[in-house]
Amino acid sequence: DSGVTQTPKHLITATGQRVTLRCSPRSGDLSVYWYQQSLDQGLQFLIQYYNGEERAKGNILERFSAQQFPDLHSELNLSSLELGDSALYFCASSVGERNEQFFGPGTRLTVL
Amino acid sequence: KNEVEQSPQNLTAQEGEFITINCSYSVGISALHWLQQHPGGGIVSLFMLSSGKKKHGRLIATINIQEKHSSLHITASHPRDSAVYICAVPAGGADGLTFGKGTHLIIQP
């Protein structure tokens, strides 16, 4: 158990819908990262937050957005969902920046 | 953008064998990560290293910064080591990671 929690574990929804994935980092960790793992693209970095502020963006679509709240938990919002958004979404956290990252169990999103 | 190459893509070995997985990257980095992903999907951080060598139990990771190359070794391999091993490096100027495609390791009893 890494100490990073993600909810929900599984999510099934329809095209065009909007969903929110939630992540709670390890106690004391200030950085949160979101990653997407799909069969065709593999693991990809989406976005990073540090102590409430956006730090870096990777291959995040404009339909996706995220935020980190004052209690340091983070949410990833996915809207106008398409079939190709079906994937495992991982959250990771680290103490600061450029530190070892600890991964949550992931949320498996299925878009029908 | 950093390109990460891993080899081999697939590896099947017998219990007890010494295993080596290689990773090379294209752009200089501050540190490299080795991750393990089990069939259930969970990802575990094995190592983060910036120079030399690190050891945890039967796992050893080495890195050569000048050659932009890292290796992960497993000594006395066991069926429970069967998993996908993934090498990752910082994505450009960000702390988010760029990942290799992974090495699918199967250890047969």
Image (cartoon, helix red, strand yellow):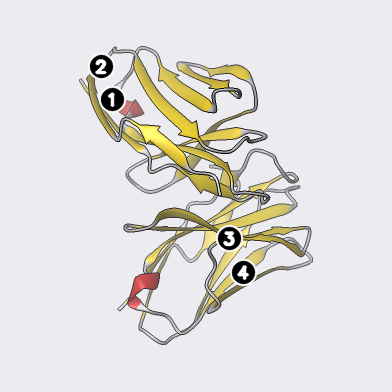
Q: Determine the chain carrying the residue at label 4.
A: A
Contact between marks 4 and 1 (CB within 8 A): the answer is no
- Which mark is first along the chain, 1 or 2? 2
Contact between marks 3 and 4 (CB within 8 A): the answer is no
Per the model, the C-alpha gap separating discs 1 and 3 is: 35 Å
Task: Provide the residue designation for mark 4.
Answer: A75
Residue A106 placed where, x, y %? 47, 56
Residue B58 placed where, x, y %? 45, 16
Task: Provide the residue designation for mark 3.
Answer: A58
Task: Provide the residue designation for mark 1.
Answer: B79
Badge 3 element: loop
Q: Which kind of residue does numbered mark 4 sit on?
A: Glu
Question: Mark 3 or mark 4: which is in front?
Answer: 3
Residue displayed at 41% across by 87% down: A16
Q: In the drawing, what numbered circle is on residue B100?
A: none
Q: In the drawing, what numbered circle is on residue B15?
A: 2
Along the line of sight, which residue is nearer the eye, B90 or B28? B28
Q: Which kind of residue does numbered mark 2 sit on?
A: Glu
- Which mark is first along the chain, 4 or 3? 3
Label 1 crowd bin: few (<14), some (14–19), many (20+), radius 10 Å:
some
Contact between marks 2 and 1 (CB within 8 A): the answer is yes
Query: Which quarter of the picture shows residue A76?
Result: bottom right
Residue displayed at 58% across by 16% down: B53
